[in-house]
């Protein structure tokens, strides 16, 4: 059994966010013609994905962290390969963001968010990590996915991953002044 202390407040917020997402999709896909209200089935797809994600989380909670940790590096490399492959697939609406895999249309940049976070967290969580090591390990982990995503082009996702990188650095031993120096050129753009 995992000796993990769960943050129930965070779990509650996560569930609340998923419920809010389904409700938002339901209400935004409703149309009214006179007295008749019609709702598109988009919210059902979201409910299916909520069910899948809850199932995956429950399964992962049963697997010891040491065993999960073995799969982080291969998952990160696999996502980098997907980000590279998607660049050679046909364009969809002027960009190379989507690919078909096992009957599903996936966006590898979305997978890159999670795998990059896990990959970098594994690197900077080691004990006795200096400020320079934290910065360098996180930079090398985030640099390649951001560049590949910018080539797609998908500026929004690249910026999101960059913001995640800064947030991860903010909880390490990197000083606030270093973070400010890194962020100020981006803000000036």
Image (cartoon, helix red, strand yellow):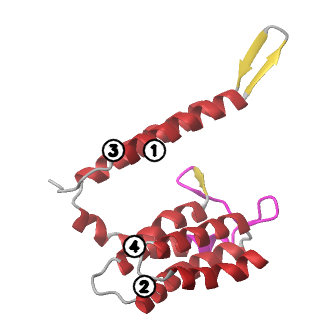
Image coordinates of residue 161 in percent, x first then y, are: 59, 69
Circle 2 Cα neighbour tier, 10 Å, few/some/many (<14 / 14–19 / ≥20) = many
Circle nearer the viewer, 4 or 3: 3
| Most foreground residue, 82 or 3 | 3
Give me the C-alpha separation between circle 2 and circle 4. Answer: 10 Å
Circle nearer the viewer, 2 or 4: 2
Residue ID at (45%, 39%): 15
Query: Predominant secondary structure in magenta?
Result: loop
Residue at mark 3: 8
Residue 14 numbered tag:
1
Question: Image height check: is 53 above or below 162?
Answer: above
**Going from the N terminus, do you reach mark 2 or mark 4 first?**
4
Residue 121 numbered tag:
4
**Going from the N terminus, do you reach mark 1 or mark 4 first?**
1
| Most foreground residue, 146 or 128 | 128
Give me the C-alpha separation between circle 2 and circle 3. Answer: 29 Å
Give me the C-alpha separation between circle 2 and circle 1. Answer: 28 Å
Which quarter of the picture shows residue 74? bottom left
Circle 1 Cα neighbour tier, 10 Å, few/some/many (<14 / 14–19 / ≥20) = few
Find out whether the residues at labels 2 and 4 contact each other: C-beta distance under 8 Å.
no
């Amino acid at each position: 059994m995992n000796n993990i202390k769960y943050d129930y407040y965070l779990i509650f917020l996560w569930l609340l966010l998923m419920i809010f997402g389904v409700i938002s999709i339901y209400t935004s896909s409703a149309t009214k013609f006179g007295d008749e209200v019609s709702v598109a089935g988009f919210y059902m797809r979201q409910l299916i994905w909520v069910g899948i994600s809850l199932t995956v989380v429950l399964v992962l909670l049963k697997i010891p962290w040491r065993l999960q940790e073995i799969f982080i590096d291969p998952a990160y490399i696999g996502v980098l390969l997907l980000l590279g492959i998607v660049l050679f697939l046909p364009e969809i609406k002027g960009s190379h963001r989507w690919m078909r895999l096992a009957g599903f249309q996936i966006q590898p940049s979305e997978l890159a968010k999670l795998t990059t976070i896990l990959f970098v967290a594994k690197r900077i969580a080691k004990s006795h990590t200096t400020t320079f090591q934290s910065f360098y390990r996180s930079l090398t982990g985030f640099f390649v996915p951001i560049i590949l995503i910018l080539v797609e082009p998908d500026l929004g996702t690249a910026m999101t991953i960059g913001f995640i990188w800064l947030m991860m650095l903010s909880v390490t031993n990197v000083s606030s002044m270093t973070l400010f120096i890194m962020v100020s050129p981006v803000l000036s753009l």
